[in-house]
Image (spheres, rainbow, N blue to C red):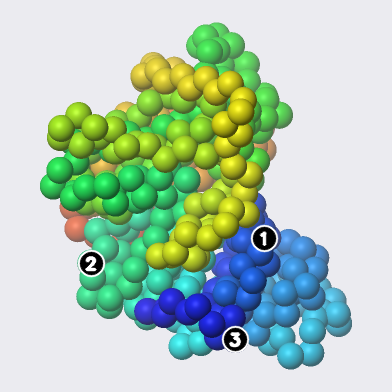
Amino acid sequence: MGQISEDPSSPKRIAVLGATGSVGLSALDVIAASRGRLKAIALSAHRRLDELLRRAIAVKPKWVIATDQQAADRFNWRRLPGDCQLLTGPEALEEIAGHEDVDTVLAAIVGSAGLRSTWAAVDAGKTVALANKETLVIGGALVGKLATERGATLLPVDSEHSAIYQALKCGHLCEVARLVLTASGGPFRTWDMDALRQVTVDEALAHPTWDMGPKITVDSATLMNKALEIVEARWLFGLPAERIAVMIHPQSIVHSMVEYVDGAVIAQLSPPDMRLPIQYALEYPHRRPAVAPTLDWSERLTLEFEPPDFERFPALELGFRAAREGGSAGVVINAANEAAVGQFLEGELHFTEIVPACASVLESHHFSPSPTLDELHQLDGWARREVENWVCA
C-alpha cells in the first residue's frame, strides 16, 4: 500500500489510468498544484494519443501507456521524452497498476474496460483512488474480498461517494440510518414522457452542471449513472439497498448526505468540480488548500431537493434491484447500458429505449449469485450481444 509522504523529494507516486478523460485531466491539475507532494509516474490513454503525448511532455512520467495497440503502432512518438518508457496494449495497464514503484492508482478508465487494471492494483495491495464505478458495479463482492485479503485501500473519487466517505467520519457505520445520494436530474428533469421520446443526442449531451465525457453525460440524463452509484455504494460502504436513497438536487452543491439514527444529517457541500474529490483521495488522509473553486458565502445560495420520479427515470429501479440481488445483476446492467448508450449515440436507439433495453437483458439472463471473475467477463460480452439483438429485433 502507498505510504503518506510529507517530503517533496519523496512524493506519492500516482499512476493516472485514463489520463486524457475529464477525471484524468482534473487529476493532473491536482497533481500540478500539489507543490511536489504528488508525482504522476504513469499516464494511460486509449485513442487520444495526441493529448497523451502532450501531457507526457509536460509531466515527464516514467511510463506512458497506449492501450489501443493499432493506434499506438500508427502514432508518431518522436516527441516523447527520452526517459519516458512507452508501453502498449491493455496488458500494460495491469503491469503498471501492480508495479512496486506505484503508490496510488487513480482508476479513471470509463466503463468495464477499467476492471482488470483496477483488479491488478487491488491484488497488489495498492491504494486505489476509484473513479471507475463500474469496477464495483460489476464485481463488488469479489473486489471487496480481494481488498480485504491484500490490504488494499479503496478511496472513492465519484463526488457522491466521496461526500459519503467524508460524512461517515462523523459517526460509526452501525449508527447510519441511510445514505442519501444526490442527483442533478440531468437536462430532462422536468420533461414529460412525450418530450423524452423526442430527445436528440445533442440534447442528451448538454448537462446543466457537470462537464463529462459523452457516455457518462448520457448516463446522467437517464439517471443510469445514479443507478450504478446505488450499486457502488452498496459494495463500497457495506449497506443494503434498503438503506440507500436518492434525492434530486438540481444545484449539484450538496454531493450526498448521511443520515444517522438520531436524525442528524451530515452533508458535504462544494461547487460542482471534480478536482475536490480527486484531491481528497490523492492527498488522503490530509486536507490541502483548495485547487477547485470554493463556495462564495457572500452570495445568496438556494438548495432544492425533491424525490425522483421513478416513472420518468426507470433506471433507478434497476439500480436498486442490482444492489438488492448482487451476483451477476450488476455486470449485466452495466454492460447492457454501455452497449445501449453506444447505440443511442450512433442513432440506432431512441433515448427512451436505453433503459428498457437494459431491463430486457437483465430479465433474460441466467442469474448467478456468486460469479467468478471469468464468468463476469463472459456475462459482460453476452449482455452486449443481447443489446445488439434487441436493437435488430
Asked whether, in this view, residue 269 is left or right of residue 326, the answer is right
Position of residue 14 measured from the top left corner of the image (x, y, whole percent):
55, 74
Foreground mark, 3 or 1, reads 3
Q: Where does the image place residue 7, in percent across and percent down from the top left?
A: 54, 82
Of mark 2 and mark 3, the one earlier in the sequence is 3
Residue 15 on image: x %, y %: 55, 74
Secondary structure of residue under mark 3:
loop
Image quadrant where residue 126 sits: bottom left
Q: Nearer the viewer, mark 2 or mark 1?
A: 1
Of the residues under marks 2 and 1, which one precedes in the sequence? 1
Residue at image position (15%, 35%) is: 261
Q: Crowding at label 2, few (<14), some or many (≥20) Cα neighbours within 10 Å?
A: few
Q: Quadrant of the N terminus?
A: bottom left
- Identify which residue is drawn at 48% across, 79% down: 5
Residue at the front extreme, as displayed: 298
Looking at the image, can residue 180 be seen? yes
Q: Is residue 380 left or right of residue 327?
A: right
Helix, strand or loop under label 2? helix
User: Which residue is the extreme one toward the bottom?
Assistant: 83
Q: Are circles 3 and 1 on residues that touch, CB within 8 Å?
A: no
> Marks 3/1: CA distance?
19 Å
Disc 1 target residue: 29
Amino acid carrying label 3: it is Ser
Question: Mark 2 sits on what residue?
Answer: 145
Q: CA distance from mark 2 to mark 3?
A: 35 Å
Looking at the image, residue 148 lies above or below residue 360: below
- Residue 246: percent from left, percent from top: 35, 29
